[in-house]
Amino acid sequence: MNSGHTVTVFGAYGHTGRFVVAELLNRGFVPILSGRDADKLRDLAASRPGLDVRPAAVDDPAALDRALSGADAVINCAGPFAATAAPVIEAALRAGIPYVDVAAEIEANVDTFAHFAERATAAGTVVIPAMAFFGGLGDLLVTAAMDDWTTADEAHVAYGLSGWHPTAGTRTAGAVSRERRDGRRVVYSNGRLEYRDDAPPTLKWDFPAPMGVRPVIGEFTMADVVTVPSHLSIPEVRTYMTVEAAGDLAAADTPKPAAVDEHGRSAQTFLVDVVVRSGGGERRAVARGQDIYAVSAPLAVEALHRVLTGRTRVVGVASAGAIFDAPDFLRALSPHISLELFR
């Protein structure tokens, strides 16, 4: 593919940002490297000769406008998104270009839907939050599993991670989210977000073979509780995380991800098991792959490619399942994700 489209990547030098830049280049896009740290941008550009470098801080609208000038779209990879999403979306609206981010922060994604839905729709442009492993992938899987159902009683998204070596950005984003919710945890129940002070339960989840039955942290809530209910009528949306991965995330001494292949991916593997129930019926979707950070890049870039080539269903702020043909999108990720649908 040789799209020739120019895409500003804000936070290009971050862990996920680097994967996004590489994916854009592999697919024929022309990345513009942007972010807050000029030195890190120059270091990245040294390994990617010929790419434009445009430093910008989120509290400098003029610099953001320069970073997006002439670009066909922007992908925001810079967390915490509580601080970066709104300023970069504002800049995208001023430039009249699509915006995609990889935010896993629940509150930041809620803010994007609440604050920009009307303006993005009026502008006739697209804003896609959480277009990443958490939020985007789960939403696509739930939407694909739903198929012709218009409503369901409950949706469950179980994350079978072999482990989780969090990036510095993940740790910072988690701290910001905990502060915003005063240390409480959040669940999506009875058709709304609810905040609770008790500890989440430890349960058993029967993952598809060969993983099998594993202990999971129940109500380990991720961005799917924002993306899925944004367009699907499901009053109960629950997410789960394998105990080992949750323990890695919680431990202060868990190291950062380490590359094990030529693509820079870590050895981490994942299995996402989605179960949707309506009345007495049950449908399931399963995705498998390697490295939750690396796989966020093809998710975001495939989304952007579809936006720029007119393969969207709506304008405004929308999650992946609302704006794209979910089964077709997931099949397009076959080099990165294996997919099974059980209806």
Image (cartoon, helix red, strand yellow):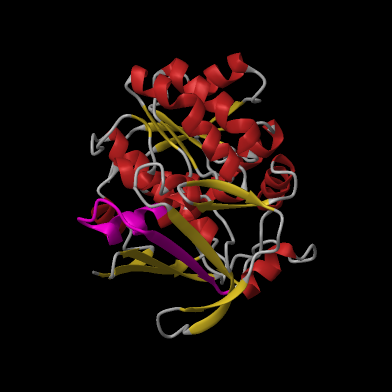
Q: What stretch is highlighted in magenta?
A: 139-162
Q: Is residue 326 left or right of residue 42?
A: left
Rendered location of residue 146, percent (x, y): 28, 58
Tally of numbered tags: 0
Q: From what the image shows, is residue 341 above or below residue 72?
A: below
- Which of the two residues, 341 or 15, is positioned nearer the viewer here? 341
Of residues 239 and 247, which is closer to you in this image?
A: 239
Residue 237 is situated, as x and y percent measured from the top left of the image, at: 46, 56
- Residue 194 magenta-highlighted: no
Q: Is 73 left, or right, of 342 in this rendering?
A: right
Which quadrant of the structure image shows residue 273?
bottom left
Q: Quadrant of the C terminus?
A: bottom left
Q: Residue at x 74, y 49 (%)?
A: 183
Q: Which residue is drawn at 54% across and 44% down?
A: 103
Please indicate whether residue 74 sits to the left or right of residue 27 in the image. Answer: right
**Front position in the image: 274 or 271:** 274
At 49% from the left edge and 60% from the top edge, which residue is drawn?
A: 238
Residue positioned 67% across, 21% down in the render: 59
Residue 328, quarter of picture? bottom left
154 above or below 271?
Answer: above
* 279 lies above or below 39: below
Report whether residue 3 is seen.
Answer: no
Q: Which of 274 and 33 is in front in this view?
A: 274
Q: Indicate the position of residue 285 as horizontal and vertical percent values.
A: 33, 67
